[in-house]
Image (cartoon, rainbow, N blue to C red):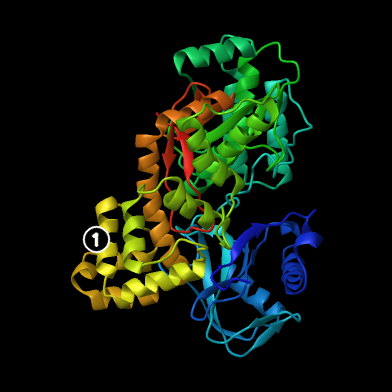
Amino acid sequence: MNKLLKFKEFSLTIDSLLLEASGWEQILIDSYETMFPTNKGKWTLYKGSGVVPGEKECFFRAPFGSTNQKENIEKFLTLNKVMYKNLEEVSKDESITSDYQAFRFTVEQNTPIGTRKNLVPGIQYFVVNLEVSLSGNTVIGSRKSFTPADLQFNDKDFFLDSNELKETLISRLLDKNTDNKIVDLVSSIGKAIVEFKTKKETLSDFLTGVNERGSITFEIPFSNPNKEEISSENLSIIKNNIGEILGGILMLNKLKDLSRGVNFPTASNEQVIDFSVDKLGFSSKAGKIGGGAKAAATGFCVKVKTAIDTIGWQPEPGREQEFYDNFIKPIRDHRDVGMRCKSRIFGSNVYMMTTGFPNSSSLWDLFLQLSEMSTDNMEQESFISAFDKIKTKGKLYEIVSKIKSITRSSPKDKTVKLFLTKDTLREENLASKLYDQMNNDQKIGIILYYCSVEFSKYIDEKWSVELNSLLNKTLRNQQVYMDLNMKNDTVTFHIKSMQTGKFVCGPLNGIDWQTKQLTLSLSK
């Protein structure tokens, strides 16, 4: 397997337990669930090819309590016969996660876990506590907790009554032993939505109104039973995950004469859909219009390709067809597109900048020029060799200078942030030293991310008409934004049509290039 691949996170459910976990992983799972029998399925593992020398490895991620977490982790390590020393909480700068509290330990001697895993002295091993945030607040769950799927909603269960959906939501929150303050807040918001006075409309009339006006807003006051008692991390989970269900409650209150009602497609079955109303898809985002997390471009590109395959229409000849071939297809198919790349994201992004849209990124052009790298059959290993060649030439300062001219934003990664300081522009030796401290993922990520900043601007400036033509003709979905204002005790829903709204392209959401993708989102 490719040694450049870092450990990738994947969550497991009880149903997939035996399929996904085996060997040493199952040993860890069994020991954890022996300690915490009520936390079955709440742990997270990492898959990967091993640890690159000198790097950090996540040993296990799971809820370990909010008050006696260190003691619980010690028991967990002892239960697995790990020979360790110096278990300590780590700071944000040293951690392997930007969300949760982590503890680091040092292995004293080779420690086998089962027959296929061996903990090696000299490697930093981490245990992440999914129950406490970096700011020290107790967290009700991970980012993927309390989604409709996590709360047992699925595409086969339809709701026609807003109060029934609200009561079902509260019942399932209680089944998960959710903190009472969270349940009370969600119940209060849900009750306010159910009782909100609004003119009933058919789905058809409602959609006509959204298309004609561009967007529709509902501002709903609610009674806050826990003023200032809920952390920002937990509010984020409510807005991002439970908000999908609250949006469904609003639609049931607003619409009349529905035939099937609201349901929640099973995770990964539908692209750009979080819930459906009589089979019409609604995508849910936290925040104001144009805000919140940006959606990966892949889902939209899949929708365009599916429409072409099922409906039979074709892009218009000329620029629209060209944009489809060079943007929609590479992202949709996640193909290497003729390149022998081990990462499909790497392959599709490199293809678009090199072949699909040449001269779309001045940083990419400079990288190719300085490294003298051939773009034929490019692989990630050749990319690193090319970057090393730039260092050997003493030209790292040119890369740093170009990046700083692209954007003033500063990356979160501490090592990359140091590499991009003004000091490296003056001292090539310092640039080389900091370059050597970066791992291969960071080296690939720093180029791909800042190239994507330029590339996304290029698409919006040169290809906006073709992008929006394809998406508007393809998508009939509605975008729902939910914003929760705890100061004014109001929940606001903004609904915007993807059929008439304007889309903009966004860069990779960080230098974690293996999981981040280009984004597409509706503009304000």
Q: Residue at x 25, y 78 (%)?
A: 429
- Which residue extends farthest left? 426
In the figure, is residue 507 to the left or right of 378? left
Quarter residue 486 falls in = top left
Split into 4 quadrants, where in the image is the C terminus? top left
- Relative to 119, is 179 above or below? above
- Relative to 236, is 382 above or below? below
Q: Residue at x 60, y 16 (%)?
A: 254
Q: Residue at x 42, y 42 (%)?
A: 506
Asked if residue 223 shows in the view, the reply is no
Point out residue 458 in the picture as x, y percentages from the top left corner: 36, 41
| Mark 1 residue crowding within 10 angstroms, few (<14) / some (14–19) / many (20+) | some
Point out residue 371 in the picture as x, y percentages from the top left corner: 35, 68
Quarter residue 146 falls in = top right
- Relative to 326, is 101 above or below? below
Asked if residue 6 shows in the view, the reply is yes
Point out residue 74 in the picture as x, y percentages from the top left corner: 62, 76
Q: Amino acid at mark 1?
A: Ser
Q: Which residue is mark 1?
A: 401
Please state which of residues 67 and 282 is positioned toward the viewer in this rendering.
Answer: 282
Please state which of residues 49 and 20 is positioned toward the viewer in this rendering.
Answer: 49
Point out residue 424 in the picture as x, y percentages from the top left corner: 24, 69
- Which residue extends farthest bottom? 109
Quarter residue 14 falls in = bottom right
